[in-house]
Image: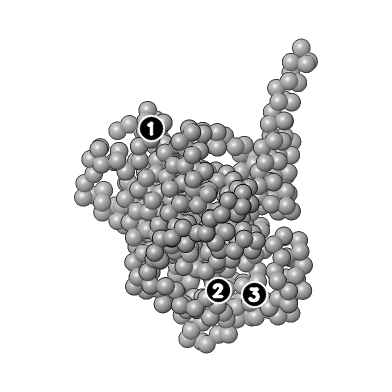
């Protein structure tokens, strides 16, 4: 069977290729099992990412259902799993704080159009060539920012002022609120994170995140612990998808949101193609980068119409999909349908989930997101260290877009300097 290299530039969804090659009962059974496995992982993460982004938990589920289905149905990878991702938390939270939910939905819509245009312009290969030091730098920075954003719920802290967006002021406000620490909430959050780490070592095939959330919810309910839950903060989750609708659009608002949408587009393109590349390395196959970007664009447009947040390829869930034995994009499509089934049938159960438990889940996500070994290795040579530290520092002190742009410009300048130096010495 060819590995897909010869057709990597085609605008043809991998789903069609799978059906042309032949798809049977054994493949469907494997895809069904993989879909269920990924859905179990996606359920708590979808809600946790939404809450951490400053929106209600059901918006994370809408993103997984609509965006995840479209990414797999139209995408250029056999194994890509689309949905909300931790990398977007910082950008989404800042957008919601400044422009509100309607502004966020319009930004996601604009970003979807841009991603599709980037794919149709065959610029996918350019995104894939963002320097490795830049990728590691902004990823590590995002992990630290997300971790800081979870400390409030992890400890059940009561803040006397609104939580700042920037890292250093945020830490100062959180430190001042330490006397309000809720021991029960901290036990739930820290215990959930610890259980996930233990299960990963002891029973790596078990769904540690889901088990931790379930056990935390049962313990909080049975022991009547004084902790905040999804229901106490957000009320009961809806039992169905909302009707699709366009967010309010004005020319002035579009102009305001274009820079933010560009940031969403850049991050979404990088994350999606990195995730597809990880799937390639695990399977020996080749994804279609431009087709993948078109699919990501359509998925973001769909997510915005249904009230969701940004969609991107998710590395951890895609890797889980591969390890679970997926054979085709049908696994990703069915994972979205399993999450829809939960929304239709069991949404009230989500109300019992303590917010501290979801914070504990995100602590684990941050630990996994931060590429610690890669960070240390890149520090060993001065050009990569300069790019890495500039990207990392600007990401946590200023914002993600500044970090990425500065890192790429600095990497290009250093590459030109290294190229010219030998010539001048001749």
Residue at x 57%, y 68% (from the top left corner): 359
Q: Of the numbered discs in the image, which one, if any, rests on residue 10?
A: 1
Furthest residue toward front: 251
The image shows residue 191, relative to residue 76, as above or below, that is below
Residue 281 visible in image:
no
Task: State the quadrant of the C terminus.
Answer: top right
Q: Of the numbered discs in the image, which one, if any, rests on residue 387?
A: none
User: How many circles with numbers are drawn on the protein?
Assistant: 3
Residue at x 61%, y 49% (from the top left corner): 255
Q: 10 Å neighbourhood of mark 3: few (<14), some, or many (≥20)?
A: many
**SS of the residue under disc 1:** loop
Q: Of the numbered discs in the image, which one, if any, rests on residue 355?
A: 2
Which mark is first along the chain, 1 or 2? 1
Q: Residue under circle 3?
A: 155
In the foreground, 396 or 235: 235
Disc 1 vs disc 3: which is toward the camera? 1
The image shows residue 52, relative to residue 255, as above or below, that is below
The image shows residue 169, relative to residue 330, as above or below, that is below
């Amino acid at each position: 069977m060819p590995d897909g290299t010869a057709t990597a530039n085609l605008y043809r969804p991998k789903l069609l290729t799978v059906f042309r090659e032949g798809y049977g009962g054994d493949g469907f059974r494997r895809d069904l099992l993989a879909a269920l496995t990924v859905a179990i992982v996606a359920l708590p993460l979808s809600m946790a990412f939404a809450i951490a982004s400053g929106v209600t938990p059901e918006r994370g589920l809408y993103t997984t259902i609509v965006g995840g289905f479209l990414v797999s149905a139209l995408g250029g990878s056999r194994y890509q799993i689309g949905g909300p991702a931790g990398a977007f938390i910082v950008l989404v939270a800042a957008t919601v704080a400044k422009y509100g939910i309607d502004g966020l939905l319009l930004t996601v819509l604009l970003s979807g159009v841009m991603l599709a245009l980037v794919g149709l312009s065959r610029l996918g290969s350019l995104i894939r060539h963002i320097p490795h030091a830049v990728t590691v730098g902004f990823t590590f920075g995002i992990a630290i920012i997300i971790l800081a954003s979870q400390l409030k719920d992890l400890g059940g802290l009561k803040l006397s002022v609104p939580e700042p967006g920037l890292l250093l002021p945020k830490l100062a406000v959180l430190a001042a609120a330490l006397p309000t620490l809720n021991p029960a909430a901290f036990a739930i959050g820290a215990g959930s994170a610890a259980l996930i780490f233990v299960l990963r070592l002891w029973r790596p095939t078990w769904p540690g995140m889901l088990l931790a959330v379930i056990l935390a919810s049962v313990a909080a309910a049975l022991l009547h612990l004084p902790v905040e839950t999804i229901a106490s903060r957000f009320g009961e989750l809806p039992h169905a998808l909302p009707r699709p609708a366009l967010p309010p659009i004005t020319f002035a608002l579009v102009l305001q949101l274009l820079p933010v949408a560009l940031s969403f587009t850049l991050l979404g393109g990088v994350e999606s193609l990195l995730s597809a590349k990880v799937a390639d390395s695990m399977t020996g196959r080749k994804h279609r980068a431009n087709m993948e970007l078109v699919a990501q664009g359509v998925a973001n447009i769909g997510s915005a119409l249904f009230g969701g947040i940004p969609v991107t390829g998710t590395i951890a869930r895609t890797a889980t999909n591969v390890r679970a034995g997926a054979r085709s994009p049908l696994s990703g499509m069915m994972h979205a349908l399993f999450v829809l089934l939960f929304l239709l049938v069991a949404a009230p159960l989500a109300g019992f989930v303590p917010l501290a438990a979801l914070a504990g889940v995100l602590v684990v996500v941050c630990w996994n997101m931060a590429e610690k070994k890669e960070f240390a290795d890149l520090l060993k040579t001065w050009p990569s260290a300069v790019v890495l530290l500039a990207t990392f520092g600007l990401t946590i002190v200023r914002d993600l877009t500044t970090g990425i742009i500065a890192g790429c410009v600095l990497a290009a300048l250093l590459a030109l300097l290294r190229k010219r130096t030998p010539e001048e010495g001749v």
